Amino acid sequence: MYYGADYYPEHWPEERWPTDAEMMAEAGLNLVRLAEFAWTRLEPEPERFDFAWLDRAIEHLAARGIRVVLGTPTAAPPAWLVRQHPEVLRVRADGRRVHFGHRRNVCLVSPVYRSCAERIVRAMATHYRDHPSVIGWQIDNEFGCHDSARCYCEACQGAFREWLAARYGSLEALNRAWGTDFWSHTYRAWEEIPLPFADALPANPGLALDYRRFASDANVAFQRLQVDILRELCPSHFVTHNFMANGFQELNYYDLARDLDFVSWDNYPDLRRSDPAQLAFNHTCIRGWKGANFWVMEEESGAPGTTVISPNPRPGDIRLWSYQAIAHGADAIVYFRWRTCTFGAEQYWHGILDHDGRPRRRYYEVQRMGRELQRIGAQIVGSEVNAQVALIFDWDTAFAFQIQANNPAFDYFEHLKRYFVAFHRRNVPVDIIPWSADLRRYRLVLAPALYVLSPDAAARLRAYVEKGGTVLFDVRTGAKDVYNRVAEGPLPGLVADLCGVTVDEYDSLPPDVTVPLVFDTPIVSTQKLLAHTWCEVLAPQGAKVLVRYGGQYYAGQPAVTLNTYGKGRAVYVGTIANPPAYERLVDELLSSTGVQPLLDTPPGVEVTARWQGQKRLLFVLNHTNAPQSMSLPGEFHDLLSGQPLSGTAVLPPKEVWVLV
Ligand code: GAL
Ligand code: ZN
């Protein structure tokens, strides 16, 4: 298993490099990522390349058996490039051009920038194609970060018009799709079509959605420009990119993942948001973008900080977060970063080593795990998470909700997480999938808030239910067509008959209002079950009522229904509820679909499984600061301690079992 660090030899005197390599090897590290921000070092002036320093750095690493992932440096252009071609700088939604002096400040559509990027990538690939230490590439760095997903420059304006012409074929079709009769927006020439600049009023929703799609495609195309070069020149190397999570939703990540060998991502749990369920959700999303295992290319290994400094990871956190990533399908862990830099905008973003480069607590924790992985890593790599429950994430829907949230408190990712958290609490694995995935391998498919509903998506979900599957839909399903126009028919639009229900009214609630929920089956829960944010008053057309509202003018009216259709069932949840209500709903779904939790554990103890054929590895992680006891169903062997475990067993705080 690869276990490594992001390393910036260019930040340190060359005399230090052998020490770094030696300390890395001592910590069990066998991989570094290099050079993703070193463009000016690699091409000090146009078309003059210098790889000698990087070659020497790699030699020291190679001497210790450490392999290399090279980053292409296109997230931060050299000053000479921007001075020569100021038009490569990105334009923000308010029309202002950004300045040099940060990163992610360029337009990925700009022909000049694309050709400069091509040149440096080609030069690097040519130089390193046969290097025995180099195993793969990370393209660019965190596409879309720092609000860079969309650019509003003239090059983008032109490219957008071409993209629209290809999509719609004619202006008549575009005018119809967007409904340009509204406010006299009808276009008679492609040159008349504007960009959706930030203004006092929002742009036409059809234009706004297409611009998000276009901009996402532009990032994917910029990545593909580099992928193509690397595939041509370095056919034996892998190609990846470091994605983001924590609610980042500016780029279609299914599209971005498609051209890569695997997805990587940057995991900064940061104690302010280190809720284990959130972290689990992040890993699950990342695994979902390609439907496959992934790498963590930047794993937090010290206190984050730029102007102010966040709390330190507590003893055991770095190792626990790393095992959690592995538990959810990571096949490599790479820490950000080897050593905390003394200069630059991130001089307070801490790595494994502090500024002084001496080994301390965090180094020894990384080392402990490094030695463990040397023993057990090979048994884990490549094994798969096999979930029976799927959660559909749709990027058109995400984009459309960004354009119109419907309720100020609504966020699509946060909403999907509500369901995820309830399954996570029961230790039931979930996959994130697109609606176009093969649904047959799942016993239960959740499609919450599938707002932009295409006829294709509706047909696939219908076919799945007909053949015996269970699908859950909820609020705002089918409210929009693919042009971001509101559906004409009664909601939930194209799946209304599948759900056997229509939405009579919807009520968008202010932040402080809750509405009691009354389940039709007797409740064992002592907690209040409450709706908030959004209430749809449902009119069953054949569906059975599961839950009713217990307040507002719709007291007694249906809130959740269940319909049998073909051999399967469709649940419709017409509201957003508090966590106990989701837990209760999830318990009913688990028992009716026969999906079994992996293990029953106390709160704060997470369980996942990875499979190698029939062989199962059970990861049990104690995220709490107290020992946790649980009863194990059978005889187990913990790979980490080498000890047998059975009956009632106690997992110490922040500790991990890997059970077979
Ligand atoms: C990531 C980025 C790294 C570094 C790190 C810490 O988002 O990829 O280059 O900036 O955050 O801030
Ligand atoms: Zn642009």
Image (cartoon, rainbow, N blue to C red):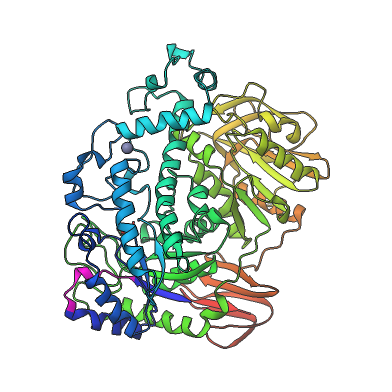
Q: Quadrant of the C terminus?
A: bottom right
Identify the residue at horizontal 35%, vertical 69% (top origin).
128
Q: Position of residue 552 (x, y in %)?
A: 59, 28
- Part of the protein shown in magenta: 6-14
Identify the residue at horizontal 21%, vertical 67% (top origin).
341
Vertical relation: 200 (above or below) 301: above
Left or right of 477 on screen, residue 245: left
Q: Answer whether residue 73 is visible to the viewer in this image.
A: no
Identify the residue at horizontal 54%, vertical 80% (top origin).
378
Q: How many marks?
A: 0
Q: Quadrant of residue 628?
A: bottom right
Left or right of 294 on screen, residue 470: right
Name the residue furthest bottom: 643
User: Where ligand 2 lies, by image quadrant?
Assistant: top left
Vertical relation: 284 (above or below) 654: above
Identify the residue at horizontal 73%, vertical 35% (top origin).
499
Q: Quadrant of residue 197?
A: top left
Q: Quadrant of residue 183?
A: top left
Q: Is residue 12 magenta?
A: yes
Q: Position of residue 172 (x, y in %)?
A: 53, 17
Name the residue furthest right: 567
Of residues 621 and 88, the one drawn nearer to the viewer in this rendering: 88
Left or right of 335 on screen, residue 396: right
Of residues 564 and 144, the one drawn nearer to the viewer in this rendering: 144
Left or right of 476 on screen, residue 624: left
Q: Answer whether residue 630 is visible to the viewer in this image.
A: yes
Q: Position of residue 417 (x, y in %)?
A: 53, 49
Of residues 19 and 51, the one drawn nearer to the viewer in this rendering: 51
Q: Position of residue 145 (x, y in %)?
A: 35, 49
Q: Is residue 514 magenta?
A: no
Vertical relation: 601 (above or below) 105: below
